[in-house]
Amino acid sequence: MNICKQCVTPTTNPKFCSSSCSAKFNNKNVRRHGSEPNLICKCGRPKGRVSKNCTLCYANERREGLLKRPIQSLFLPGQAQRFQYNKIRTWAKKFMIEWNRPKVCEACGYDKHVEVCHKRSIADYPGMTALGEVNSKENLVYLCCNCHWEYDDTEYHQQLIDKLNNKKSLQRPGYGTCWEAPSSGKGRDFHVALGDVVEMSDSAR
């Protein structure tokens, strides 16, 4: 006759009187699901049992790694140059939203539609430049489509730079802002880049 190791009762079995006693004895030091102690991340927030960091620290580490990535790793191979930088531009839009920058053209004040503009063009940076430098707060501004075009392509480039850097009012011939309010009628009047007033009728669209 043998003695059960768990309940200390006589049994004909070699070690335990039942499978219940066997399970209780062998699982004494096994942690049950839901009984884990409170696991704390290095920042003081709770974290998962397997995770090294909490959700916020994990997101911050990923963000730091992203900002250090060279921009050439984000290029789209086999695409024209204007499309190669799409990922960099997408991240620039996300950063501007996260920074809560007001969606207003910083050159003329137009707020119906704005685009993210790099003060220094992406093409001017070497391929090993970090994404955080290209998409830095100092290098990104909101511009309306007219001011963005003028900044990239026309004689107003330096004047727009002075406007953005020194916050001085633009002095353009013929008009003060890029766009005018819609006129009363089916069409609408607006100022184009060269200061001409053009009426767009329904037939011209």
Image: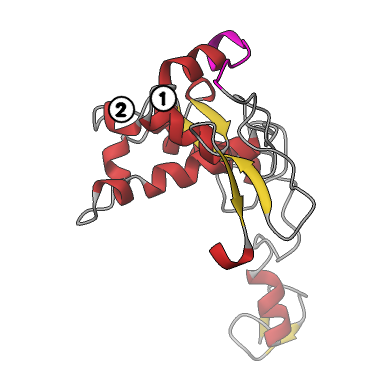
Eyeballing the image, is 87 above or below 129?
below
**Region rendered in magenta:** 164-173
**Percent x, y for residue 122?**
34, 32
Residue tagged 1: 133
- Tell me which residue sits at (70%, 33%) in the image: 102
From the image, tell me which residue sits under label 2.
129
The front one of 179 and 67 is: 179
Q: Residues within 10 Å of mark 1 (few under 14, many from 20)?
A: some
Q: Nearer the viewer, residue 145 or 71?
A: 145
Q: Is residue 24 above or below residue 45?
A: below
Q: Residue at x 69, y 39 (%)?
A: 40
Q: Is residue 180 above or below residue 187?
A: above
Is 62 inside the magenta-drawn segment?
no
Q: Do the residues under discs 1 and 2 have CB atoms within 8 angstroms? A: yes
In the picture, residue 4 is in which quadrant?
A: bottom right
How far separated are the C-alphas under marks 1 and 2?
7 Å
What type is the residue that disc 1 sits on? Glu
